[in-house]
């Protein structure tokens, strides 16, 4: 009977140790073997001893695991593995200038650098932003207008101005091939003597 009790308690101690020492399950396997061995040795001694060992294992194991899982997050290993409960203010930008900067983008014009179905990348004032199209698919290279910034997401819609309105776009956002060469600051190749 003492060997059965010794094996059972040794297995329960190893179950507790498994939660604190990373062993890739090796300690857990040894613990399960000791618990099963304790129950078998108990039944070899007598039916009453075996039933007692089985009852101890069935009651003690869930209680031990419940206690250990309550304690484990406060251990050094548990603190390393588990993340803290994050609050919205922990993950959102803290600087007020970020919000002011995003609010100042409303109404600006830019160019879609990727096809937007509904999200993609837009270039506004030379900066790339992730944006979401408000209801319409936007092709790459189309002019877009920022209509709102909600929860740090930029919402755009196709700029419905005429082709002549591309002058409204910043120079660096316009289609380079459709611009006059003088606007690009490149000397003309027509007059070689100049």
Image (tube, helix red, strand yellow):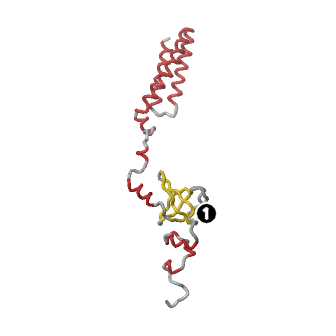
Residue sitting at the far front: 161
Q: Measured from the top left, where is residue 150 in percent x and y? A: 48, 52
Residue ID at (50%, 29%): 27
* Number of residue marks: 1
Using residue 88 as the reference point, say whether residue 156 is left or right of it. right
Residue ID at (57%, 12%): 43
Q: Measured from the top left, where is residue 159 in percent x and y? A: 56, 65
- Relative vertical location of residue 89 with respect to residue 62 in this rendering, above or below: below
Using residue 20 as the reference point, say whether residue 52 is left or right of it. right
* Viewer-proximal residue among 51 and 97: 97
Q: According to the image, label 1 marks what residue?
A: 139
* Local SS, label 1: loop
* Viewer-proximal residue among 134 and 111: 134
* Viewer-proximal residue among 33 and 107: 107
- Relative vertical location of residue 106 with respect to residue 151 in this rendering, above or below: below
Residue sitting at the far bottom: 193
- Relative vertical location of residue 90 with respect to residue 173 in this rendering, above or below: above
Q: Measured from the top left, where is residue 60 in percent x and y? A: 49, 19
Q: Measured from the top left, where is residue 169 in percent x and y? A: 51, 69
Mark 1 crowdedness (10 Å alpha carbons): few <14, some 14-19, many ≥20 = some
Residue ID at (52%, 12%): 52
- Relative vertical location of residue 154 with respect to residue 77 in this rendering, above or below: below
């Amino acid at each position: 009977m003492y060997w059965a009790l010794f094996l059972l308690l040794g297995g329960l101690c190893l179950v507790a140790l498994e939660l604190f020492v990373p062993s890739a399950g090796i300690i857990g396997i040894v613990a399960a073997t000791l618990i099963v061995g304790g129950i078998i040795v108990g039944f070899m001694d007598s039916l009453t001893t075996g039933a007692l060992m089985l009852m101890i294992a069935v009651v003690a194991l869930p209680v031990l695991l419940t206690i250990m899982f309550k304690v484990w997050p406060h251990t050094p290993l548990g603190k390393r593995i588990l993340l803290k409960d994050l609050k919205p203010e922990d993950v959102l930008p803290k600087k007020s200038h970020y919000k002011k900067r995003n609010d100042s983008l409303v109404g600006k014009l830019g160019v879609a650098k990727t096809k937007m179905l509904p999200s993609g990348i837009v270039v506004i004032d030379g900066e790339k932003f992730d944006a979401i199209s408000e209801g319409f698919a936007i092709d790459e290279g189309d002019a877009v207008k920022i209509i709102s910034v909600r929860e740090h997401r930029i919402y755009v819609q196709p700029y419905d101005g005429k082709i002549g309105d591309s002058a409204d776009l910043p120079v660096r956002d316009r289609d380079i091939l459709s611009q006059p060469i003088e606007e690009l600051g490149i000397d003309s190749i027509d007059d070689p003597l100049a």
